[in-house]
Image (cartoon, grey):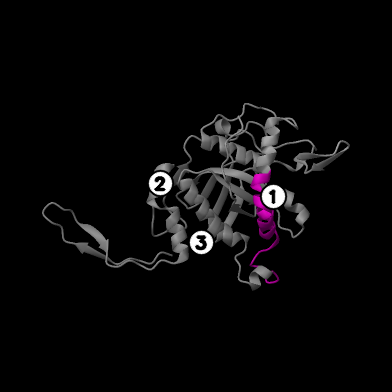
Amino acid sequence: MVPERRLELIPPGPSRPKVARPTERPALTPRDLVVFASDHKHHRPAAQTARNADPASPWHDSGMATTVRVPGFLPSTSALRFANSWPHQPDLRFKLGSQFELSVGDAANGLCGGMAFVTADHHNAGAPIWPDSEPPAEGSDHFKALVRRQLDSFDLGLLPMRFYLMQAFRSDDPTSWTSTLHVDGRSTRTARDEWPTARARLDAGQLVNLGLVRTTTADPRRLTSNHQVLAYGYSIDDGGAISIAIYDPNHAADDSIEIRLTLDASGDLASLSQSTGEPLFAFFVAPYRPKPPTV
């Protein structure tokens, strides 16, 4: 909560209206800094925004309607036109001599990270998205580009590890080691860290890659249940309900898909869902580094 400021009225001069100025600068906590960073005035011009800011309620924006969109981006016009649906085929093949071949990965598990990265690459470069209406065939240039960017999205293995930690542990479980170490669980991190970070980047006009946690198990074989999407805006209604507009590679050319969340009075997560009805337990901002698009 931002400390209350004491105001002092400055007597107006002959041609100066009354203004109110704080008599002292309140001390900021790290949490306040995260909040203020998401609302910093220098982020505003980059995104298309309609907002009446409420500095007394930075977590809820209660009673203040907000809409932010990354300029020029809609899934129906800017994202890949095919869905994330692939036959069982290797992501990569390696020739071992003249007689042996090593196959790695299975495209049937999805290439959502590669699709999100390729879409972001094209938007950031101002390049038209591929015209393909069907998933590209194995071995084609476009398929290879998706696989390369899928591997890039794994961030040298750090992304799967983060998915696993988020899906396997929660701090409100007294038997969890995260509770013993006083580490925030997935719900707390989503509300207090990941949402403000995503919001700040969207305010700056940036597409944001999000990792969606869709399972709650310690079984590492369920890592493929998780998902990656691309956020391109958000809205906060008069009651404080938040909707994050996303490009979801599982739903091609659909501009209506959203992540919906509400926060309670303390700023913790009260509800979280995806408009498509697919399970969603948490999300986090995943790393993205742009590359020149494959045209």
What amino acid is at disc 2?
Arg
Circle 3 packing at 10 Å, graded few (<14), some (14-19), many (20+), is some
Horizontal arrangement in the rendering, residue 104 relative to residue 78 (left or right): right
Circle 2 packing at 10 Å, graded few (<14), some (14-19), many (20+), is some
Horizontal arrangement in the rendering, residue 55 relative to residue 173 (left or right): left
- The local secondary structure at tag 1 comes to loop
Determine the CA span between mark 1 and mark 2.
32 Å
- Please tell me which residue is depicted at 65% across the width and 37% down the height of the picture: 251
In this rendering, is residue 218 above or below 46?
below
In this view, the residue in front, 269 or 26, is 26
Front label number (2 vs 3): 2
Residue 248 visible to an observer of this rendering: no
Residue at image mark 1: 226
In this rendering, is residue 51 above or below 269?
above
In this view, the residue in front, 156 or 15, is 156
- The local secondary structure at tag 2 comes to helix
Residue at image mark 3: 267
The part of the chain drawn in magenta is 151-176
Q: Do the residues labelled 1 and 2 touch (CB within 8 Å)?
A: no
Sequence-wise, which precedes: disc 3 or disc 1?
1
- Please tell me which residue is depicted at 46% across the width and 65% down the height of the picture: 30
What amino acid is at disc 1?
Asn
What percent of the width, then of the height, locates residue 280? Answer: 65, 51
Q: Quadrant of the C terminus?
A: top right
